[in-house]
Image (cartoon, grey):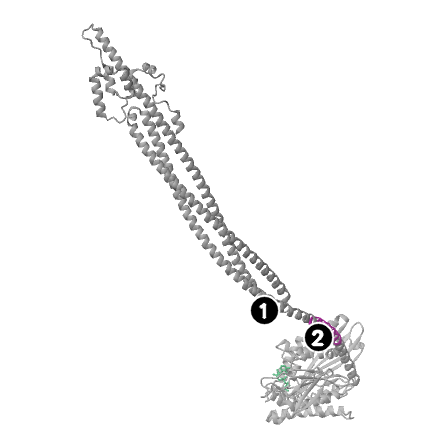
Amino acid sequence: MISRNQNKPPLSNSLPPPSPANRKDNLAEVPIDKRRKIGFGKMVGETSSTRTRRVFSAANAGQDHVTASDPASAASSQCGCIEFTLEDVEALLNEKMKGKTKFDYKGKCEQMTEYVKKLRLCIKWFLEREDNHVLEQEKLKNMVECAEKECTELKMQMKSKEEESNSIIAELRKSYASIEARCTKEEADKLAAIDSHRREKDARVAAESAQASLSEEIKRTHEELSSANQKISSANEMYKRLQEYNTSLQQYNSKLQVEVASANDTLKRVEKEKAAIVENLSTLRGHYNSLQDQLISFRASQEHAIRQKEALVNEVGCLRGELQQVRDDRDHQLLRVQTLSAELVKYQESTEKSTAEFDNLIINSSALEDTCSSQREQIQILQNQLAAANRKLERADLSALDMRNEFEEQKKVVDDLNNRLAEAELQIFEAEKLRKKLHNTILELKGNIRVFCRVRPLLPDDGAGSEMTAISYPTSTEALGRGIDIVQSGQKHPFTFDEVFTHEASQENVFVEISQVVQSALDGYKVCIFAYGQTGSGKTYTMMGKPEAPEQKGLIPRSLEQIFQTSQSLISQGWKYRMQASMLEIYNETIRDLLSTNRSSGLDSSRADSVVAGKQYAIRHDANGNTHVSDLTIVDVCGIKEVSSLLQQAAQSRSVGKTQMNEQSSRSHFVFTLRISGVNVSTEQQVQGVLNLIDLAGSERLAKSGSTGDRLKETQAINKSLSHLSDVINSLAKKEDHVPFRNSKLTHLLQPCLGGDSKTLMFVNISPDPSSVGESLCSLRFAARVNACEIGIPRRQTNVRPLDSRLSYG
Ligand SMILES: Nc1ncnc2c1ncn2[C@@H]1O[C@H](COP(=O)(O)OP(=O)(O)OP(=O)(O)O)[C@@H](O)[C@H]1O
């Protein structure tokens, strides 16, 4: 602004700046119309009316005035007594010289002189006014410059203050931001501390559970202990970190306090500065007001000059504009101060907030400290508990180690014993095999009948209290699998046989034990296997079984299957076999051919069978000990299917009836005979074996059976024949010279088996029914007697085939 003013052209615009020296000359050169524009001033303090009056008088009394305008009066006019108006000047300029006559040159000259004088006075006045105006202008200029300077200074001050305020605000903002950031950090740290506290709590809970599980499971205690140690170390670390955090919080707290104090100081300073600024502003305002007053006065003084000089007015307008700008700046500054004040208020508020948060933080810190101390105590307790648990664990470990060592040793011993046991068992097994072999050999050498005992399972039809069985099996090594004890009237009767099958033994188990005996029939031995026992004790089940269920097949079908299978396998060795089967029953001391096609089935008709057919079925033993029954149907069989159908046929023909003891009671002795003739085509060797499989009728107490009529006769016949068998056995046992084989058809038929050179095996079937203890005891006693019998050494029938008989085996 100032520079602009400085660069402005001089007030007289087209004129050079007037100087006292050259002003007159210059004025002479200035054209009158231009000079008019300069205007005329007025005397200071003069009113327009007085001025007009005076000028008017001057104009009218021009002469007097001019007369008075001598050098002295000119001098007085120089001091400002005469004043010209524009009209005066114009009137002066338009004044025309008028003589008395056209040629009154003298008068005209005098007028002209007067006129010149007036003009000179006017010019002088003008020059004086001009000088005054220039002086005033300069004075105003100086004042404006001063005002401008002051304004500039003020502006500078304002600017510096603004800068200062800005820097303070920036600093405050910075400190506020840093406080805010610290608050945020503090908050985050607090959350982290809470989180860590929670984690620590979790770790503590985990440690507690680990401790609980430690006491429960010793094996896993090691791992859990290590994990608990880790957790405790982490908890310690956490505790340390918390302590550090606590210290840092305290430090931060003190720092914050310092910062708050400094912020307060700054605030006070800012407030002071603000007050100073406000004061400055008020002084500035005062100054401004005075300036404004001055300006007003200037304006008042300038009014004429404004009218006369547009440039001055413009300048004043410029000044006004600048002043307005200054005012705007001031307003702006005021606004800034207001915003600063508002920010200050905000800052104060935020500081208060920070203080509140700080207080909260202090509270939180103290709470955290409390938590820390309580956790420290808990950790201490936990550590103590852990130490105790550790000690316990160490003790447990030691004892566990000892126990483990002991266990390992024991295990070794047990393993050793197991190995030895396995070896011993193997040895026992081998020994048993050997024993059996030797026993068989001894028996063969002795000629004893082998006896197998089989106890059937309890049946639903067995009598009440049947679960209290009187039968038991000794577990001693020597009697294991061979002994059976039966208790009658409180007295135990022990028996030992070649084999004892419990009620759990399957048909397969039983057959395995007799398969070798069956096999010897193929080798040319006479083999006789018969089942003895009271009615319903399982004889038929053992011998025949239930052919419809493969696993319940009895010894007869299994033996036949084996014989046919083995004979087939021996074909490759050159053996050819001829098998002949016959089946008979001894019913009421009568032999009946079960494969006869002429006979009709049924008990009543069978009785008349021999009579109708006229057949005798006489029993005859040849010199080789072979038994022949005259008129008996002998069927050549080649395979098991044929034999099975024959067995089925025989079963249908067999005398079976219902008794009180058995639904399907065999009322006769059933004898299946398979004659085996084998020849080895390459060695010419011949073998002749016989396999007798006999299912005896069951012994029965008449009183118990309650049989009457035909059943009574049947029972009597059965008992009688069995009694004869017993007699024979007794005789054989006593090695009497005479053995009453011919007393019954059964003993007569079994003569070669009981007294000859056959391999004989008897099954004594026992019922577990307690009500049958008497019969069972009788059966066992009988079996024991049979077992003691010596029947001669089994002899294999083998010879070289005579030439004439070779064809029959073709
Ligand atoms: N070891 C066993 N397992 C399962 N059931 C058996 C066993 N022994 C016998 N039985 C059953 O016991 C009942 C009588 O058996 P079985 O007919 O064989 O006796 P039994 O001595 O032949 O009689 P009987 O002399 O009157 O003919 C039958 O129902 C038979 O199925």
Q: Which amino acid type is marked by label 1?
A: Ala
| Residue 687 location, quadrant | bottom right
Q: Nearer the viewer, residue 793 or 33?
A: 33
Hey, which residue is sitting farthest front in the picture?
A: 72
- Tell us which disc is closer to us: 1 or 2: 1
Q: Quadrant of the C terminus?
A: bottom right
Q: Quadrant of the N terminus?
A: top left
Q: Which of 359 and 789 is in front in this view?
A: 359
Check disc 2: other Cα within 10 Å, few if <14, some if 14-19, many if 20+.
Answer: some
Q: Identify residue for label 1.
A: 212
Span colored in magenta: 403-424
| Residue 50 location, quadrant | top left
Q: Where is residue 173 in the image (x, y as percent from the top left)?
A: 46, 45
Task: Indicate yes or no whether the magenta region holds residue 91.
Answer: no
Mark 1 residue element: helix
Majority secondary structure in the magenta region:
helix
Ligand 1 image-quadrant field: bottom right
Mark 2 residue element: helix
Q: Are marks 1 and 2 in contact (CB under 8 Å)?
A: no
> Does the Cβ of the disc 1 residue fall within 8 Å of ligand 1?
no
Reply above or below: 17 against 398.
Answer: above
Q: Identify residue for label 2.
A: 564
Q: Where is residue 680 in the image (x, y as percent from the top left)?
A: 78, 74
> Does the Cβ of the disc 2 residue fall within 8 Å of ligand 1?
no
Q: Where is residue 542 in the image (x, y as percent from the top left)?
A: 66, 82
Hey, which residue is sitting farthest top in the picture?
A: 103
- Is residue 6 something one can see in this rendering? yes
